[in-house]
Amino acid sequence: MQPLAELGQRQPLWARPDRAVDEALIRWQLEEAIRRLTDEHRQVILEVHYRGRAGADVAADLGVPASTLRTRVFYALRNLRLILDEMGWSND
């Protein structure tokens, strides 16, 4: 966590065009990687990780046991990692 004094000194994103381009590229690559997932995997990643919904709630909405949802999330994240590796992302 940054000290409050440092937060006030941050430059706006538009003042750092190199960073804006990098962040846009990262967003595009993540979107493309998520698009390559199966429908089931994409759905659980979006609901649990991006929308921050509780697994039990998502499982109930999908009509599957919580254990099935956890399995889908596990394999979705594994497949997302593989896709990102294929796209040239590294663990650095």
Image (cartoon, rainbow, N blue to C red):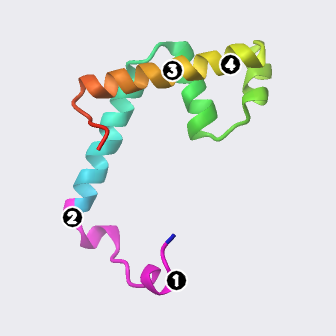
Q: Residue at x 52, y 17 (%)?
A: 75
Check residue 5 for magenta coloring. Answer: yes
Q: Return the mark for residue 76.
A: 3
**Residue at disc 2, secondary structure:** helix
Q: Residue at x 80, y 21 (%)?
A: 60
Q: Which residue is mark 2?
A: 17
Disc 2 or 1, which lies upstream in sequence? 1
Disc 1 or 3, which lies upstream in sequence? 1
Q: Residue at x 47, y 87 (%)?
A: 5
Q: Which residue is mark 1?
A: 4
**Distance between mark 4 and mark 2 Cα atoms:** 40 Å
Q: Nearer the viewer, mark 4 or mark 2?
A: 4
From the viewer's perspective, tell me whether residue 92 is left or right of residue 34.
Answer: left
How crowded pointer 3 is (Cα within 10 Å; few <14, some 14-19, many 20+) is rated as many
**Distance between mark 2 and mark 1 Cα atoms:** 24 Å
- Relative to 30, say whether 64 is above or below: above
| Residue that lies at the very extreme toward the front in this rendered image | 92
Disc 4 or 1, which lies upstream in sequence? 1
Q: Which amino acid type corresponds to the residue marked 4 in the rendered image?
A: Leu
- Relative to 20, say whether 77 is above or below: above
Q: Nearer the viewer, mark 3 or mark 2?
A: 3
Q: Which residues are magenta?
A: 2-18
**Residue at disc 4, secondary structure:** helix
Q: Which amino acid type corresponds to the residue marked 1 in the rendered image?
A: Leu
Q: Residue at x 51, y 69 (%)?
A: 1
**Distance between mark 4 and mark 3 Cα atoms:** 10 Å
| Front-lying residue, 17 or 67 | 67
Disc 3 or 2, which lies upstream in sequence? 2
Quadrant for residue 70, please give it: top right
